Amino acid sequence: MVFLADVLKDEVYRLLFHDLKSYRLDFAGDELNLMEQEFQRLYHEANLNQIGSALIMVGTLERILIDLLRHSLQEAPEPAGDQTMTQQQKLNMSLVYLHHHFREPLTLKEVAAQVHLSANYFSESFHSSYGIAFQQYLQDLRLRFAQSLLISSDFPISHIYAAAGFQTLSHFERAFKHKFGLTPRQWRQGKHEAGKEQ
């Protein structure tokens, strides 16, 4: 499930994301059943698209996230300190940071500093672990976000490129065409026409 952090209330966002942390939790028994029901409700409301569906989805999402936070606090705390984190854990944390801040003017040096690695070492490790250069990964995140806005909104392209974190329209259009084979306008038009045919 992918969502934009700005759909959350400020209080919920601060509670969950005040610290750079990656959550991976296992549920069983009654907790698992409750969590499955919450996800089923999200899926149902997304497909239903009735009056109030968006509000129900946000409320359900917030309950899921708060339950995840509570569950994580019940588990044994991990040893504190940067020294106890492995290189892979640091790289995973860099992805968490990237996915929360990709629309901002990020630099490799800034993200490396977030996980306490030198820029050169971070760059080499990132490419080695994920098979893609940091800048390419960041650009792909922005392009996928822009692509989702082209599908789900009527925002003008002149707003979408900035919302996705691109500095200029020309750079956005070149990068989009290189990745998807069409300009943003052509891609949006093709999707609209495909929707009319169905």
Image (spheres, rainbow, N blue to C red):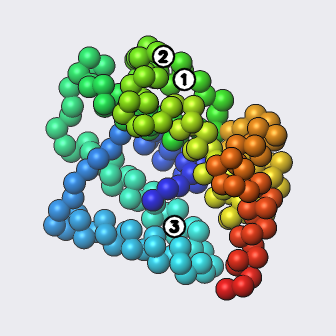
Horizontal and vertical percent position of residue 138: 57, 37
> Secondary structure under badge 1?
helix
> Secondary structure under badge 3?
helix
Question: Is 147 placed left or right of 115 in the picture?
Answer: right
According to the picture, the residue beneath numbered tag 1 turns out to be 108
Horizontal and vertical percent position of residue 66: 38, 52
In this rendering, the answer to whether 126 lies above or below 34 is above
Instruction: Tell me if mark 2 has few (under 14), some (14-19) or many (20+) residues whose alpha carbon lies within 10 angstroms of its own.
Output: some
According to the picture, the residue beneath numbered tag 3 turns out to be 57
Horizontal and vertical percent position of residue 129: 36, 33
Question: Is 136 placed left or right of 147 in the picture?
Answer: left
In percent of the image, x 21 and y 31: which residue is there? 78
According to the picture, the residue beneath numbered tag 2 turns out to be 119
Instruction: Tell me if mark 1 has few (under 14), some (14-19) or many (20+) residues whose alpha carbon lies within 10 angstroms of its own.
Output: some
Question: Is 82 placed left or right of 136 in the picture?
Answer: left
Marks 3 and 2 in Cβ contact (< 8 Å): no
Question: Hey, what amino acid is under mark 1?
Answer: Leu
In percent of the image, x 64 and y 58: which residue is there? 148
> Secondary structure under badge 2?
helix
Q: Residue furthest bottom?
A: 198
Q: CA distance from mark 1 to mark 2?
A: 7 Å
In percent of the image, x 31 and y 31: which residue is there? 89
